[in-house]
Image (cartoon, helix red, strand yellow):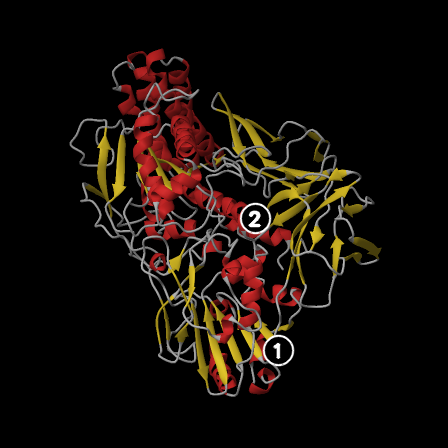
């Protein structure tokens, strides 16, 4: 585990002043504002955006519909709103690499604009998001950001993700709505000048566009690269994408690799011909000086443009860059202060952006070092933490560094703390600007060449106010299986705040709770009725909160607070008499839920897979989702598992993606090929009818699976279905999304020697997390030995 100083030194090494200054100079060269829109974190076309930002100096923003909270997690077990908070931080870090501002349509975990799961229809998506709600938020963002160009990431064509299709449809609509004076909004109208669509297919491992892309009207050159770092645009783009680690993003790009990005001009409000992205648009400060109506400030705009040119040409002579940047800042400020009223809507946002950019150029050119850190990141009301500020003023005339704190925070000598009226930290903040991070942040003020400058900087790890009282309960969800004798649940409260306070559960009539040194033992009545019970937790008569701390090395820590509630599902799932070994990849909690329902389960380490003798003590082995990818040595152990099956063992593999080291001829004991693109091999309708193809024992023993077991499912039925398989396998289920042909590669079983292999592409792990009774009952059947 690296020390804090080692982490700090490593981060420092990644930001040499000479390179940071070069990249800070690039945005000065253009006043064009380019907005990309997408449905999820990672939808942005990062290599193209890298070229636009660092070669062309174009001002970037990204509007993202959802937080990706309905997706999968390659690095941990965060799911749902917690995954959304994690991906929010990932998206912020990815935007930071590109200097790109970020806006979200979905503003909180309960927002209807959410990643509700895979969709195949833009109409279905907008129906769930709320068409009017989606457009209203999009208009608000466009009128705030005032982009010249809007470019969705994907096309609105069949075979594409419904969320992507919805965002492309909304992009067409926002072009008219944002510029319509009659559209209800408190913000001034803004007409986006151009709408481009991608002129390439979005087909691939996940999607399968049915229609060809529109013809290209121009192309963004993707060749070449940054002359100072030596990195090509594709590699810089992948440096940004590598922060999407929950989705396994970030790939190494060899030297020289690059591609062009063809675009199709779908709508334009500027004169043509459209021979380049900048065609018809003022591209520089000097171009702004030539606009009709800008005559009163034309000289200042021209002077600012000339000073910017001098600053760029002076690189890497730090003092000369600083002198020219100070001249540009003074001229830009004069132009903004004296801007004619009719031109303010067209010019002021561009001039404001230039002042922010010039502030960072001056900070770097002057060699100012400013850092701040806190002792504790997560702070309850009234809790103090140590505050450390470091400032080296470099060549500035003078400089100060102070924390910029939200309302309700207090700073004393060497400490800061949130008071009781402080707003809680927001893991779902609605926007983010890496050049002007929101409070709590650092405010650097300095003077140089007669100019006073203010620059916002982030803390090393941003402090965050969290609620009180806090009383997380573990586990926060439990199962009582009436097919077993157990009627007790052991829970514990950890980290109760305020210190010394006592947490209590609201119990249904007839339930008892006994306190012990290790926690609380809940005793349910012998004849408790099946159902879902929700038990709120209180501290001192107040609703308690659970704090989900989300801290991974590649993100700034964040946390999500929610009222503490213990959910208990009471159900009946008969269990087979088997000894189970579970091999997880860290992406599900199936082993936990098997034990919770009363099964005899052992979580297997890599050493347990090393020899045939270790396997012989188990009747059934379950391989969790993605485990072939994330469990070292598991793929190599498959021949031993195949022999174990032939000798009488039952192997259950849960769904895998084709890229999860799933060799269709080597991993399963007989060939199973997973379908691609995944859009074609999944059922996204969680209510889709399920047909049993035969009266197989897996669907009747020890639990008879019926229609009630398919009720109440969350998000989707299943995904990564098999497309074809060896004749040894028999498909047991059939299902389809509305209007589509049915799938059968969902639940496959093959009797091999004395044993059996079952491959299940249903989202059983997700359903168990959501306490869906049918998932537990079906899972119990899949564990049984072959009769």
> Which residue is nearer to you in this view: 608 or 770?
770
- The spot of residue 319 in percent (x, y) is 44, 33
Instruction: Return the residue at label 2.
Output: 82
Residue 174 occupies which quadrant of the picture? top left
> Which residue is nearer to you in this view: 44 or 323?
44
Image check: 505 left or right of 8?
A: right
* Residue 578 tag number: 1
- The spot of residue 384 in percent (x, y) is 73, 37
- The spot of residue 360 in percent (x, y) is 46, 33
Image check: 375 left or right of 270?
A: right
- The spot of residue 59 in percent (x, y) is 36, 34
Q: Which part of the image, by quadrant, shows the N terminus?
A: bottom right
Badge count: 2
Q: Considering only vertical position in the picture, is 281 above or below 52?
A: above
Look at 70% across and 34% down and name the residue there: 416
Separation of marks 2 and 1 at Cα, in angstroms: 35 Å
Work out whether mark 2 precedes mark 1 in sequence or the reverse, and give the earlier one: 2
- Give the structural element (helix, strand or loop) at label 2: helix
Nearer the observer, disc 2 or disc 1? 1
> Which residue is nearer to you in this view: 170 or 449?
170
* Residue 233 tag number: none
Image check: 192 left or right of 215?
A: right
The crowd level at tag 1 (other Cα within 10 Å; few <14, some 14-19, many 20+) is some
- Give the structural element (helix, strand or loop) at label 1: loop
The crowd level at tag 2 (other Cα within 10 Å; few <14, some 14-19, many 20+) is many
Residue 477 visible, this orientation? yes
Q: Considering only vertical position in the picture, is 746 above or below 309?
A: below
Look at 49% across and 71% down and name the residue there: 653
Look at 61% across and 66% down and name the residue there: 573
Residue 57 visible, this orientation? no
Residue 425 occupies which quadrant of the picture? top right
């Amino acid at each position: 585990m690296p020390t804090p100083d080692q982490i700090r030194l490593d981060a420092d090494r990644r930001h040499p002043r000479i390179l940071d200054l070069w990249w800070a100079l690039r945005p000065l060269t253009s006043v064009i504002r380019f907005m990309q829109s997408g449905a999820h974190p990672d939808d942005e076309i990062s290599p193209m955006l890298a070229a636009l930002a660092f070669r062309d100096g174009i001002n970037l923003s990204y509007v993202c519909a959802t937080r990706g909270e309905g997706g999968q997690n390659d690095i941990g077990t965060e799911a749902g709103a917690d995954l959304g908070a994690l991906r929010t931080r990932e998206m912020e870090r990815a935007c930071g690499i590109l200097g790109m501002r970020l806006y979200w349509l979905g503003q909180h975990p309960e927002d209807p604009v959410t990643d509700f799961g895979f969709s195949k229809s833009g109409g279905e998506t907008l129906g769930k998001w709320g068409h009017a709600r989606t457009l209203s938020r999009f208009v608000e963002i466009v009128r705030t950001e005032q982009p010249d160009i809007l470019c969705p990431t994907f096309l609105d064509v069949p075979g594409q993700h419904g969320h992507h299709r919805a965002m492309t449809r909304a992009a067409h609509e926002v072009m008219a709505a944002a510029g319509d004076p009659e559209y209800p909004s408190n913000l001034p109208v803004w007409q986006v000048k151009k709408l481009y669509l991608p002129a390439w297919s979005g087909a691939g491992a996940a999607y399968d566009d049915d229609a060809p892309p529109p013809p290209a009207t121009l192309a963004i050159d993707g060749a070449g690269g940054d002359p100072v770092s030596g990195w090509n645009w594709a590699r810089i783009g992948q440096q940004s994408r590598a922060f999407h680690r929950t989705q396994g993003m970030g790939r190494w790009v060899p030297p020289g690799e690059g591609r062009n990005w063809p675009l199709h001009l779908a709508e334009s409000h500027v004169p043509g011909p459209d021979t380049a992205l900048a065609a018809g648009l003022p591209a520089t400060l000097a171009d702004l000086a030539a606009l009709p109506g800008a005559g009163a400030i034309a000289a200042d705009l021209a002077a600012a443009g000339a000073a910017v040119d001098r600053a760029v040409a002076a690189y890497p002579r730090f003092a000369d860059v600083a002198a020219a940047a100070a001249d540009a800042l003074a001229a830009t400020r004069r132009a903004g202060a004296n801007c004619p009223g009719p031109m303010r809507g067209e010019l002021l946002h561009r001039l404001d952006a230039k002042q922010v950019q010039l502030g960072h150029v001056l900070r770097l050119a002057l060699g100012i070092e400013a850092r701040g850190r806190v002792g504790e990141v997560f702070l309850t009301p009234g809790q103090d933490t140590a505050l450390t500020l470091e400032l080296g003023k470099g060549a500035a005339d003078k400089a100060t560094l102070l924390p910029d704190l939200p309302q309700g925070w207090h700073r004393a000598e060497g400490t800061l703390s949130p008071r009781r009226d402080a707003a809680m930290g927001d893991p779902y903040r609605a926007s983010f600007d890496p050049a002007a991070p929101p409070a709590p942040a650092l405010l650097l003020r300095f003077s140089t060449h007669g100019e006073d400058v203010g620059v916002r900087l982030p803390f090393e790890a941003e402090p965050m106010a969290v609620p009180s009282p806090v009383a997380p309960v573990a586990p926060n969800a439990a199962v009582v299986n009436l097919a077993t004798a157990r009627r007790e649940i052991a829970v514990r409260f950890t980290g109760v705040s305020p210190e010394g306070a006592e947490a209590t559960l609201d119990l249904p009539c007839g339930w008892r709770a006994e306190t012990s040194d290790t926690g609380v033992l809940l005793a349910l009545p012998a004849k408790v009725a099946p159902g879902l019970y929700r038990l709120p937790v209180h501290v001192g008569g107040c609703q308690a909160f659970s704090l989900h701390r989300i801290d991974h090395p590649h993100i700034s820590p964040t946390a999500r607070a929610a009222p503490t509630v213990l959910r208990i599902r009471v159900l009946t799932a008969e269990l087979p008499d088997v000894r189970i070994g579970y091999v997880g990849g860290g992406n599900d909690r199936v082993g936990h839920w098997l034990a919770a329902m009363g099964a005899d389960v052992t979580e297997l380490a890599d050493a347990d897979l090393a020899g045939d003798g270790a396997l012989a003590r188990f009747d059934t082995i379950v391989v969790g989702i993605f485990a072939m990818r994330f469990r070292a040595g598991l793929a190599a152990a498959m021949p031993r598992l195949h022999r174990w099956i032939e000798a009488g063992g039952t192997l259950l593999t849960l769904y895998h993606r084709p890229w999860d080291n799933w060799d269709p001829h080597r991993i399963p004991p007989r060939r199973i090929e997973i379908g691609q693109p995944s859009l074609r091999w999944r059922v996204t309708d969680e209510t889709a009818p399920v047909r049993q193809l035969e009266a197989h024992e897996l669907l009747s023993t020890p639990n008879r699976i019926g229609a009630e077991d398919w009720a109440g499912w969350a998000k989707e039925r299943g995904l990564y279905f098999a497309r074809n398989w060896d004749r040894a396998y028999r498909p047991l289920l059939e299902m389809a999304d509305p209007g589509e042909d049915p799938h059968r590669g969902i639940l496959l079983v093959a009797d091999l020697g004395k044993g059996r292999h079952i491959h299940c592409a249903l989202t059983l792990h997700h359903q168990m997390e959501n306490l869906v009774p049918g998932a537990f009952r079906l899972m119990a059947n899949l564990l049984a030995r072959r009769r």
